[in-house]
Image: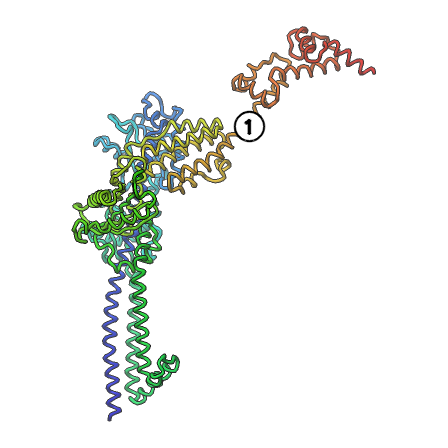
Amino acid sequence: MRIRASSKWITQTLLLSIMPVILFGSLIYYMGSRIVQEEIHRSSMESLSQVRHQVESDMVNIEQMSNQIALQSDIIALMNIQNETTLGAFPRTNAVRNQLSQIKNVTDTIHSIYFYHIGQQIIVNHDIVSKVNESRVFRDVSWLDNVDDMIAARSLQKWVAPREIVSLNGEATSTLTHIRLLPMLYKEPKAVIVVNMKPDFLQRTISRFPLNAEGKLFVMNKEGQLIARIPDESGEGDKDDALLHEMSRISQEGVRTTRVGEHFLSVLRSDKNGWTYAIAVPAYVPRQPVEEFKRIIIIITVVLCLMVVYSAYFTHSKFQRSIRSILDRLSSARPSEHPQLQGDAIAVMEEGINRLLATVKEGQSKRDVHLSFLRSHYLHSLIHGNAVDVSRLAKEIDRSELFPLGKLCVMIAQMDESGQSSFRAERELFLFAVSNIGTELNKLQEQDESTFRMESIITDRHTVLIVNYPDGEDHDKLPVTLADQLRSVVKQILKQTITIGVGTGVDSAHDLAYSYRDALQALRMNVASAYDEVLPYANMTLVAEKLVHYPAAEEQELLHALRSRDGALAERCLKAFRDELDGEHASLQMAKTFYLQLLVAVIRLVQEYEEDIAAVFGENPYESFFRMESIPQIDNWFREWLMSPILRFMDSVKRRKTETIIRQTVDMIHDRYSSDLSLQMAAEEMGISVSYLSKLFKEELGETFIDYVTRIRLEKAQGLLVETELNMGQVAEAIGYTSVQQMFRVFKKKLGMTPGEYRESAKTKETE
């Protein structure tokens, strides 16, 4: 009876143990589903931010490029042609075509560029010059309606999205189009520049979808029209229409990620242009791991049921003997450190559990010690955009609720150089002090952490402060206000001034790299003029882009130096070009655009003599240029990599040209020595000046043109005097002299004898 009661008790215990397993499994299944959806939201928002930033960067680059095209002298000349002169007959039309072709080829985001003369209704692009109504040659005219609307509204530029490009065979592809009216400040528009992005512009903005799923990407303008999608599948029209409908609704309601049918749909709206970006991920992909866990719970439940059957079948005494056997083996496998516990299996297990708890506490203590280093490394990874380190550390750091508020902004504090500063030799100490003041700023102002939070990092030259503040228009100016307060407190406490660059506000910690670059750019743009100031990036870029002008004079001087093969002058011109940009505080994007324009001008100079630029440089210089990431790097690249090959090439061009001129001149002398031959006539036939031909002849042959002609004539006269019976007048006429007296004077001067004496001397030698 006791054995049966014990067996029944064990069976009931195992049955009861199944319930916690099922409850725990259900709880984990529910939590796992929530975690999966949150992970989809996080990764989708990261991907959408990347897509939005790339698309907006491409649009800004195209706007800046259209500004530069509008300032080209050839474009201005073509624009100012009246209707009397046909555009196709104007010599600069081909130059404009070449410029448009070069810009299109070096920019991987542009499908085509048009120049449209409104008065003559003529289109110029990289391969045609055509009337706008010539459908056999040019069919893409849907943008003309937008031009009329812009003229009516007196608008300068406009983005048309979406728009369909129509090819000559009638195929239509969707794209984005930028339209700019010329001139810049017009009373009556004269021309239009149209830039079309490549139809696959969206494909290049995203490398993979969240969780490596075969997702979908949509972009919709602020009017609710679909701009582009990835992939563009015609068979999924009904499903995509449902997603687009939900996309519009979700964008208006402010919800970011939700379940829509068979997809998780994440939506991000751009504050800059009102466009909406969305990613749809199939629901079955992220739920697969959770379903696997569900199956594991079912298996564990089945195993426990089998154990219930086992315990019901066997007696309590057999079960007890089995447990004792296992405990004996465990105790014999690892002897206890305390001899008095030998033989007591339960005590041995208790000792092992205590050792395990001690190890866990020790690990927890080490984790707390190293958390500050982990935190600093994480912040460094965020501002430098190191996605690998961020994804690896984010889960651990998020437990500490580092950024609980909605918005983030980066401020960079830099110590002003001053001869009276007590920190000149202790920059690191000063930056550390600024870091401490920044992180304690809310306490100094007696504000709680719900107003704002501040994290700091110290680099070689700067103190980087990350401001976490509430979302909303009322708090947009808070970072600039805090920066000014920090500047004032540092000046008061440390008796030293600082300049602070303030980046743009971002919504996610993963976008802090953009804010950091903006703040750093604000400092660099004003490195020479700023002192004890707060420099918001938005103000700096606006001022810089308004004031910067292209250094056209320095470009022309550099081209002249390269043509003249003057390396020292080329160095000075390139330095003057850089100084001009630095003096006007050009932003990195603007400076890179100007350097690209300079590169195009230099390459055009080389192509005047050699079409294959790879033969001069060894590789495509445009590809090397677009790998440059800073103004000093671009300047060094121009100085060290580009100028030397061009100077060597121009030397070789000069050598080949000189050799050709001398060879042709010598051949002409040998062919026409018997006629009236002069240096003036030879220079005119060679197409160069008299003085230049005279200089080349002297440098290459070591004698003047007249001396060389005289020597050839004397050699021919000597041959005629010895080999023929011609009289002196006939010999003089045969070698190009107008009289016998002239030939006598030359013979006497060069050979010391008359022609007759030379003939007699030659005959005497033959007789002997």
717 vs 164, left or right, is right
Residue type (three-letter) at the residue carrying disc 1: Arg
For the N terminus, which image quadrant? bottom left
Q: Is residue 244 visible?
A: no
In the image, residue 81 lies at what x, y percent?
33, 23
Identity of the residue furthest to the right in this view: 768
In the image, residue 25 lies at what x, y percent?
26, 71
Q: Residue at x 35, y 55 (%)?
A: 388
Name the element at disc 1: helix
Q: Is residue 501 visible?
A: yes
Out of 227 and 586, give the one closest to the viewer.
586
Q: Which residue is mark 1?
A: 655
Please tell me in which quadrant of the rendered image residue 350 appears: bottom left
What number of labels is visible? 1
Q: Is residue 26 above or below residue 190?
A: below
Q: Is residue 708 above or below residue 492?
A: above
Q: Residues within 10 Å of mark 1 (few under 14, many from 20)?
A: few
Q: Residue at x 53, y 27 (%)?
A: 654
In the image, residue 365 lies at what x, y percent?
30, 65
For the C terminus, which image quadrant? top right
Q: Residue at x 52, y 19 (%)?
A: 688
Out of 595 and 172, give the one closest to the viewer.
595
653 vs 160, left or right, is right
Q: Is residue 312 above or below residue 206?
A: below
Please tell me in which quadrant of the rendered image residue 94 appears: top left
In the image, residue 670 lies at what x, y percent?
64, 19
154 vs 550, left or right, is left
Identity of the residue furthest to the bottom in this view: 1
